């Protein structure tokens, strides 16, 4: 009896903490919070819950919807905690339908391309294989390598393309597609239809040539192998010293010229920002301010200077910001003016949301911007609130 009373008290305490969050977030997010609360109540530690979520090969919602009796699962979890009928009624009302779940999982194809412009790689590998006539084997792959905090986003990529696998090691997760058929029938057609805008497009065009040669089995001949090595020599970082020694007479194929292209869809920019941008909150000493501190905000996108033209187009597209070239090899686009942040940047990402872990930094960034808009940063209470928010952003965020 004492155990039941303790469970019920734990639930009531956690419910009070979670209810404000549940009202502000999406239905899927609210449902996930409730499930986690239920698991905690029943004695499962947070570390175990996180591990289970990270190790799942499919998104947690797939597991809930397709591999269990949903209502039965929740009754089994909540009944021992003495959950009231009103709580259960609210719980059921929050459960998204299977159709709503499917719609929520779909990524905009332009977001896919924008994020791929930022984080993906198209690779061609050549390795030793004494079982082949040429003594060399060739492999190709499309990869996205991220921290495990973005595992959910990688699962969405896998669901979008319907091919490939996700591999987790320590704090890293990689979505990879290596099958020639999958690359030729899924990955390449996507980027043909929704083209990359950065210089990465040149690597993609060369990658296509290599996949085509492999599809025709030309890599099994000396001539075909040399063609692929010639392609690889113009991709990414070129040939390793070992390959240069093995193929001393190779002439790199001409690298395709990527002409500057205007941003053609806002979701491309949302995807690109998910991969390349940062939301900063700075607190600095200031002898001219009453509190001795000044707060600043900065939205920044950094890219290789090869994409300087594309970076310069960001200001025109967003209607704010400026470009900097601080180190010669990189180009920065920054927005620091508070009115630009509150009137242009925040409305843009509210309409075209970030979908990965960076969305949490954006949410905190927005909170600080609203405090500053209301002049709250000029008070001790507001400044302390900003300090607390800042401490959990970017690298300070635990999950």
Image: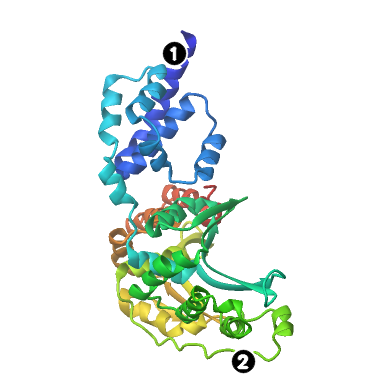
Residue 127, quarter of the rendered image:
bottom right
| In the foreground, 153 or 166 | 166
Residue 163, quarter of the rendered image:
bottom left
| In the foreground, 355 or 258 | 258
202, above or below 359, in the image: below
Circle 2 sits in a helix, a strand or a loop, which is it?
loop
Circle 1 sits in a helix, a strand or a loop, which is it?
helix
Residue 225, quarter of the rendered image:
bottom right
Q: Which residue is mark 2?
A: 251
Q: Residue at 47% x, 87% y: name it.
A: 256
Q: Which residue is mark 1?
A: 5
Q: Position of residue 123 (x, y in %)?
A: 55, 72
Q: Position of residue 19 (x, y in %)?
A: 34, 34
Q: Position of residue 259 (x, y in %)?
A: 40, 88
Q: Residue at 39% x, 41% y: name it.
A: 61
Q: Is residue 378 visible?
A: no
CB under 8 Å between discs 2 and 1: no
Q: Which mark is residue 370?
A: none
Q: Residue furthest top?
A: 1
* Among the two numbered marks 2 and 1 on one chain, the one whose residue lies closer to the N terminus: 1
Q: Residue at 38% x, 33% y: name it.
A: 34
| In the foreground, 352 or 71 | 71
């Amino acid at each position: 009896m004492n155990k039941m009373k303790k469970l019920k008290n734990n639930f009531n305490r956690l419910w009070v903490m979670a209810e404000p969050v549940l009202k502000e977030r999406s239905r899927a997010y609210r449902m996930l919070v409730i499930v986690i609360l239920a698991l905690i109540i029943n004695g499962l530690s947070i570390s175990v819950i996180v591990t289970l979520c990270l190790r799942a090969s499919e998104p947690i919602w797939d597991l809930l919807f397709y591999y269990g009796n949903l209502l039965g699962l929740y009754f089994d979890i909540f009944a021992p905690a003495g959950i009231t009928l009103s709580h259960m009624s609210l719980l059921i009302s929050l459960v998204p339908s299977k159709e709503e779940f499917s719609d929520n999982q779909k990524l905009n194809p332009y977001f896919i391309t924008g994020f791929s412009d930022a984080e993906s790689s198209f690779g061609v590998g050549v390795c030793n294989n004494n079982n082949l006539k040429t003594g060399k084997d060739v492999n190709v792959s499309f990869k996205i390598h991220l921290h495990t905090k973005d595992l959910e986003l990688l699962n969405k990529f896998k669901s979008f393309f319907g091919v490939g696998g996700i591999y987790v090691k320590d704090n890293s997760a990689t979505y990879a597609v290596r099958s020639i058929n999958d690359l030729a029938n899924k990955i390449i057609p996507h980027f043909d239809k929704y083209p990359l805008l950065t210089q990465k497009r040149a690597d993609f065009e060369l990658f296509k040539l290599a996949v085509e040669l492999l599809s025709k089995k030309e890599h099994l001949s000396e001539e075909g192998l040399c063609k692929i090595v010639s392609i690889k020599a113009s991709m990414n970082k070129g040939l390793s010293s070992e390959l240069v020694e093995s193929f001393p007479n190779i002439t790199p194929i001409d690298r395709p010229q990527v002409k500057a292209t205007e941003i053609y869809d806002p979701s491309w920019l949302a995807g690109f920002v998910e991969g390349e941008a940062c939301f900063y909150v700075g607190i600095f000493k200031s002898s001219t301010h009453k509190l001795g501190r000044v707060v600043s905000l900065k939205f920044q996108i950094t890219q290789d200077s090869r994409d300087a033209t594309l970076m310069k187009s960001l200001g025109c597209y967003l209607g704010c910001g400026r470009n900097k070239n601080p180190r010669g090899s990189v180009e920065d686009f920054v927005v620091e003016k508070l009115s630009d942040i509150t009137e242009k940047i925040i409305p843009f990402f509210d309409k075209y949301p970030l979908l990965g872990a960076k969305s949490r930094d954006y949410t905190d960034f927005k909170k600080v911007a609203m405090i500053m808009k209301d002049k709250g940063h000029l008070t001790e209470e507001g400044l302390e609130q900003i300090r607390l928010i800042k401490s959990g952003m970017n690298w300070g965020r635990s999950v």
